[in-house]
Image: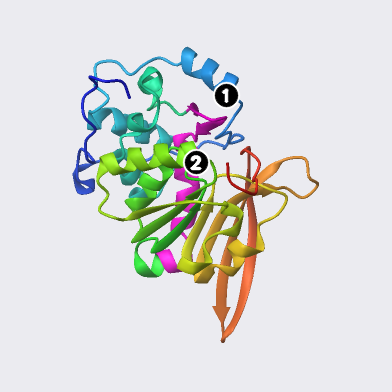
Amino acid sequence: MSTGEAPRRRFPLPLDKLSPQPAAKAQPRELLRPQRHLQQAAQDAARQAAPSGLGMDSAGVRLRMVQRLQREGLKDERVVQALAAVPRHEFVDTALAIQAYEDTSLPIGHGQTISKPSVVGRMIELLMAGANARAQGQLGRVLEIGTGCGYQAAVLACLARQVLSIERLKPLHEKARANLEALRLGGRVRLIYGDGRLGHAGAGPFDAIIAAAGGEDLPEAWLAQLAPGGRLVAPMLAPGGRSQVLVVVDHLVEAGVSRLVRTLHEPVLFVPLKSGVL
């Protein structure tokens, strides 16, 4: 952020003070494109109209964003409130801040983009439907693969006991740390610079795992670190190998026997999952 910008704030309103309107009937889902090419993201940002009459720090502008997401099918009120609480404009460059509450991805540097709010909401909503989340009333301990600028980690922190997030690009890891420290999350988010494909066995197992990059299949390390009753949500190459879909994996335990149950959901388009650190 540039010198002279107003200091970052904590979440502007308590979650229980937000009152989103009831969701309208969900419309058919289109292909989710959370991380399109940077040129396309920039073009979309330029075409979008800036919110009028409300400042970026206003709870009203975030409420208007989540009401739109509800009309498009987002149903979990806890996810709605978390999205409404996090100041998304604090996670993007100042020049793009006026587009922060449109449902679009935006460049965050280093060849990456911040995911669309609708995609973040959809994936977290799927996590919230896992067995452990239902039993605990929250996400418990979460592993996030691909911190990016830290926006999704901040939303997860509203819904989880603890979030451990891994980023392989050092400049983004450092940017996310600065962004999240400004929000004063009270230690609920722990950031790791490392290879996300390996997960973080030393801190596992996890009640929920969420990934912001997709490969041909899910790494075995992720599956091994998923706690009984836990749920994993990630993009993966669809059968046939021509596109990506959201994959949900549940670690079920029935009559003392553990098994992993995989289900496929809607098409998505994420950046490739890569190994190593940069």
Q: Residue 12's image quarter?
A: top left
Q: Residue 99's image quarter?
A: top left
Tell me: residue 141, above or below residue 185. below
Amino acid at the residue labelled 1: Leu
**Residue 130 image position (x, y, % from top left):** 48, 63
In the image, taking residue 243 as reference, residue 132 lies left or right, namely left
Q: Earlier in the sequence, mark 1 or mark 2?
A: 1
Neighbourhood count class around disc 1 (C-alpha, 10 Å): few under 14, some 14–19, many 20 upward: some
For disc 2, the marked residue is 170
Q: Is residue 61 magenta?
A: no
The residue closer to the viewer here, 245 or 111, is: 111
For disc 1, the marked residue is 38
In the image, taking residue 242 as reference, residue 92 lies left or right, namely left
Q: Is residue 129 magenta?
A: yes
Amino acid at the residue labelled 2: Lys
Question: Among all residues in the image, which is located at the extreme bottom?
Answer: 255
Q: Residue 212's image quarter?
A: top right
Neighbourhood count class around disc 2 (C-alpha, 10 Å): few under 14, some 14–19, many 20 upward: some
